Amino acid sequence: MSGGGKILRRIGWGLLPPAAALLFALAISSIVLQLSGNSPWTTFSAMWEYGTRERTLITTVNLAVPLYLSAVAVAIGFKMGLFNIGVEGQYRLAAVMSAAAGAAVSLPPVLHVPFIILVAMVTGAAWAGVAGVLKATRGVHEVIATIMLNTIATGIGAYLLANYFQDRDNSLNTKTKLIPTSGWVPSLNRLLGSVPTGANLQGFLVGALVVGILFYVVVWRTRFGFDLRATGLNPFAAQASGVNAKGMIVRTMLLSGAIAGLVGLPEMLGFFHRYTLDFTTGLGFAGIAVALLGRNHPVGMAVAALLFGFLSSSAQILDLKDVPKEIVGIMQGVILLSVVVAYEVVRRIRAAGEVRAAAEHDRVREPAAPVPA
């Protein structure tokens, strides 16, 4: 097979699982809708019509940005064979600390926003580093450590907010002080020209694009990334070749936590400009689903984040149609479960095909038996 044919075949195998998972999710959701007395065609048509409006598309992108950042943070751990399930606690604690730090200083915009970003990344890295050190020095599994650290981070964040960072303005909503305008990230509406009233394409989209590019460069184009992937595939072989496996665990968790610290910034710097108790939650766990659906690849995760964002934004119309919005959660869950199964099925089919191809190759190369005289 030619080189071009092999590339197309590989792309086809890569696209098959998510496409099959999406179709399966649509089928299951249709059955659920039918059983609940709702027309699947009417429901999906309404979601598509509402979801493809300009205002809703902007909302879709805004929802996808934090999901993508969360997925990148998870994917860094996955590439190392680590399951950083603590992105939830890391970004929430980072949001509290960076909001308080951003409100406490007055800097020029060119310094203020990077300062807030730095505080968030350092906080996320430090919190994830705890799990990395426990894993490397005491053998504590990162899933157990990060789950416990999620709960601890929530408690610490609430304590700091209530006792040290709260804005005492007699408001019933517990929140940090407002970040000065120099620390806000402007919208990208000027790049779009005319936009619907009230729609704002958040500027942190640029940051997410930069993170995706850096993720690809670091993981696939640097020695550190090679060591990371090699350790994830076979830690014993990597250690035998000179890779410090324990050091890689700590560095990978630090890097994963640093990216996790950015997850809350699009909402905080682009819309509310402070941290409140009703800050968006669940982005860390949703990032796991996006990373799995996108196969830990920057482009695949971007598509998956946009898909999840589209489902969430288009679901807003369901209330007006008297259709339960929980159907979107069902679709997301079915997509995740089915894509995991589909990827495993495809992997086994490809592996079996490679074994047959190797056996056929060896049979062709096998020398003919000598003809007796």
Image: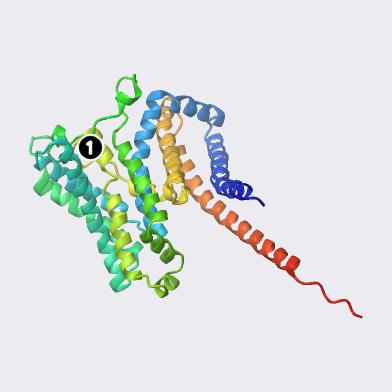
197, 367: nearer the viewer? 367
Give the residue at x 36% y 60%.
224
| Number of numbered markers | 1
Based on the displayed image, in which of its 4 quarters is residue 25 positioned?
top right
Amino acid type of disc 1?
Leu
Q: Position of residue 56 (x, y in %)?
A: 39, 27
Does any portion of residue 94 appear in the rendered image?
Answer: yes
Q: Is residue 220 left or right of residue 153?
A: right
Looking at the picture, the colour scheme in use is: rainbow
42, 75: nearer the viewer? 75
Give the residue at x 29% y 73%.
138
Based on the displayed image, in which of its 4 quarters is residue 26 positioned?
top right
Residue linked to disc 1: 269
Mark 1 surroundings within 10 Å by alpha-carbon count, few (fewer than 14), some (14 through 19), many (20 or more): many
Give the residue at x 58% y 44%.
20
Residue extending farthest to the front is: 373
Residue 173 vs 240, above or below: the answer is above
Based on the displayed image, in which of its 4 quarters is residue 117 positioned?
top left
Q: Position of residue 156 (x, y in %)?
A: 18, 54
Quadrant of the image containing the C terminus: bottom right
Q: Position of residue 34 (x, y in %)?
A: 56, 34
Give the residue at x 27% y 56%.
150
Residue extending farthest to the right is: 373
Does any portion of residue 174 appear in the rendered image?
Answer: no
Q: Position of residue 137 (x, y in %)?
A: 28, 72
192, 273: nearer the viewer? 192
Residue 32 vs 145, above or below: the answer is above
* SS for dot 1: helix
Q: Is residue 110 left or right of residue 369?
A: left
Residue extending farthest to the bottom is: 373
